[in-house]
Amino acid sequence: MRADLEVTGPHGPIPVRVYEPDGAAEAVLVWAHGGGFRHGDLDMPEADMVGAELSRRANAVVVSVGYRLAVDGVRYPVPIDDVHAVWTWVTARTDLPARRAIGGASAGAALAVSAALRATASPPDLLLLAYPFAHFPTPTLGHGRTLENIEDMVRNYVGRISDLPADALPGAARLDGLPPAYIVLSESDDLRPSGELLERQLREAGVPAESFLAPGTTHGHLNRPDDVPDAVDASLGFFAAALRAPRQAPRWLRRDGEPRIEFGADYNPEQWPREVWADDVRAMREAGVTIVSLGIFAWARLEPAERRYDFGWLDEVMDLLHAAGILVDLATPTASPPPWLTTRHPEILPVDRDGRTVWPGARQHWRPTSPVFREHALRLVRALARRYADHPALAAWHVNNELGCHNVHDYSDDAARAFRGWLRRRYTTLDALNAAWGTDFWSQRYGEWEQILPPRYANGPVNPTQQLDFKRFSSDALKEHYLAERRILREITPDVPVTTNFMVAGPINEMNYPDWAAEVDFVANDHYTRPGPQSRDELSFSANLCGNLISGRPWFLMEHSTSAVNWQPVNVPKLPGELARDSLTHVAHGADGVCFFQWRQSRAGAEKFHSAMLPHAGTSSAIFAAVTDLGARLRSLSGVAGLARTPSDVAVVIDYESWWAAEQDSHPTDRLRYRDEALDWYTALLDAGVRADVVPVSADLTGYRLVVAPILHLVPAALRQRLEEYAAGGGHLVTTYFSGIVDEFDHAWLGGYPGALRDLLGIRVEEFAPLLDGESVPLSTGTSGTLWSERVEVTDPAVTVLAAYAGGGAAVTRRAVGAGSAAYISTRLGPQGLLVILDELLSPAGVVSELPPDLRGKVELAVRGPVRFLINRTAEPVELSAVAGAPQTLPARGVVVLLSPGTPG
Ligand code: GAL
């Protein structure tokens, strides 16, 4: 619905066109078209089409302003006065939604920002700016629009080109306090630097700003919807997703019915002839499958040639699954680009550190920062979302697959460009970057942004801060790809949750998941065990961290294996009982979905020897029987669904930045493995029968009695202060060797180690003394340390030495800090060595095991509200007579679930 009205302003009536959505409005937008301040009207596409489309797509009331143009003597600030008057009129209306935005295109974007700067009494909630013309002189003057042209525009608008008022072209104004800004940039636009500069300026002023680069466009593309329909569509989608009221995350699947634990797998029907599909669905029902992740690697089948879609077969599968009551977690099939795309656009292929092209043949052969890949991927996502938006089986979106599994570190020219942009946003000036990167070392000082490269192959160690920033950037670049897909999915299916499968498992650390977690509607994880004595504990550790990425809320185990995988050097099958124990351990730590890779074991392809729910042997197999039993067991546990993890008294802190920084090259030893140390602590705590939470460093630590932060290498000043306050507030902190050493720029804290934590710990270390392979240092506790040692000088009388090196000198110390304490372990003790000193650390914190003495070490306890899980850590049955309501014995590798005291599940 649209209506032409007039609003009274300081210079007389102002024509406005109001667009109303069909349903209840969620937001209101005041919009100003462009036209160099002197052209344009309410009928141009940039006003009329944009107004109508944004109203429809975002359920918004859009008020498009026919402000006075700079003609016939009209000049600055009259157009701003008009836009501001309309804003005032809108904000005074109580019948309009509370969520308010202001925006515009080109010169209109400048007017929108200037009006927002004035609107201090009723500020907007967000800014939508299309290819803003926000500066004079413009940052660079490219091709096309000449200098005279721009000068003429400004002279006509303001009357002069010098001594401009700050808000005339508002890039010159104070921008702090403005609301979050969403900026659409035209790709080949000589005014694009103005939009990019504005984005950087906003960020520098503390204003969140996000931009979308519309591929293949020139300035003013919203005015030419027929020429570049896809880019216009994508730009409007970007704005609409921002304008719409934010969804409440976290959210769970779109489905009706009682809470339950979901059960299923990746389903790849495209690998099988159609006749098999009905058998699949029958067997799924038999196994109790409730959900499948569909179409993950189906790009080549869904878009067999550019823009030629074949959704027929997927329609059929979706219908079949729906008829059987099975939900679909539908994948955007963007993980593996098809041959037609890589043949036509080899420039999307990643480049490794040595400059080698990553050729097709496997999967994920795409650059996270390639605009060409992005365009093709997003077009497919849009087509898929439109096709299945209303399909009743669609319960969630599964974006791509394990983003970054194979392509996280791309060193291509696209990556170089994007890296520079990321660095400009981070540091703003080259001086700041040079200081942060310490470029006076080895003559690395940069004079132009264009000189900066990713840390490509070099003949020696590459600048460590460059490496660290590249890791940060690479994680962000992939997250950015996820967000770009999510924007489209949220725009088309606002009520369908969006997630992507994380890889919280073993040594995988390239994606900073604590930072990603806020962007998914629910956390989903893939976990595969690796052989070794701590394999089971590692699974628990990973599940535990997943459960704490969003404050203890339920999450979704998207993949694990029924038995052997195919990608380890030797692929060992699971022992009887392990399949269920592994699954239930994830549930114990908050998983409300248990899925496998994959439903039916492939007949061809690289994964034909990877286990599945339905193995090559068919339904008459031990695996299928174990799968079916698990399905039944999970059904009996529906009472667990929705329950948050119950926090424990002990936290083991994980910090991805410390992980990255601690394992960089040119260090005292290259043998240090951050996560192994963290896992050792977790194992030692399990051995002591103590429940711990594995939490990101950003978590609120104040509720924990004991916080173990192993190898907390990178400690910015703010983190040091948090930890000092934690201990001063009565908390008990434990940290280890190589902690507190550098700040966020990877610069050493001076004055002696452990740098930032030296005063808190009351010790000082001058030199590290890493140990050679096979070397160990005996300790007074009877155990010994490996990997690392130090000569620890005690500098504070409040420090007690808990263990000494047999050759002399403190090895483990604790400093009393008010009612709290700060302890330090200067060598690698391993789980057994840690267990020996653990009591000394737990007792002052008042932490005690919740398990009867006989069960400590043999059984892991996990708690979700009233429900307790007892997991057998051993290969022997464990006597449970000491546990009220439990059965007599817990079988080898078994799990008992006590739904409420006295009700084993
Ligand atoms: C995962 C991946 C799956 C499958 C699985 C095999 O990393 O997402 O597609 O390859 O590994 O273990």
Image (cartoon, grey):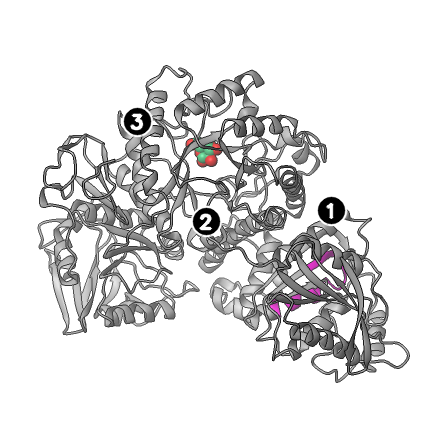
- Residue drawn at point x = 75 percent, y = 85 percent: 163
Nearer to us of marks 2 and 3 is 3
Q: Dot 2: within a 10 Å radius of its alpha carbon, few (fewer than 14), some, or many (20 or more) residues?
A: many
The label shown at residue 230 is 1
User: Helix, strand, or loop for circle 3?
Assistant: loop
Which of the two labelled residues, at mark 2 and mark 3, occupies the earlier sequence position? 2
Is residue 203 found inside the magenta-colored segment of the image?
no
Identify which amino acid the numbered label 1 is placed on. Answer: Asp
Identify which amino acid the numbered label 3 is placed on. Answer: Lys
User: Helix, strand, or loop for circle 2?
Assistant: loop
Q: Image check: 504 left or right of 789?
A: right
**Residue situated in front as seen by the camera: 771 or 503:** 503
Q: Dot 3: within a 10 Å radius of its alpha carbon, few (fewer than 14), some, or many (20 or more) residues?
A: some
The label shown at residue 511 is 2
Q: Residue furthest bottom?
A: 163
Q: Image check: 458 left or right of 736?
A: right
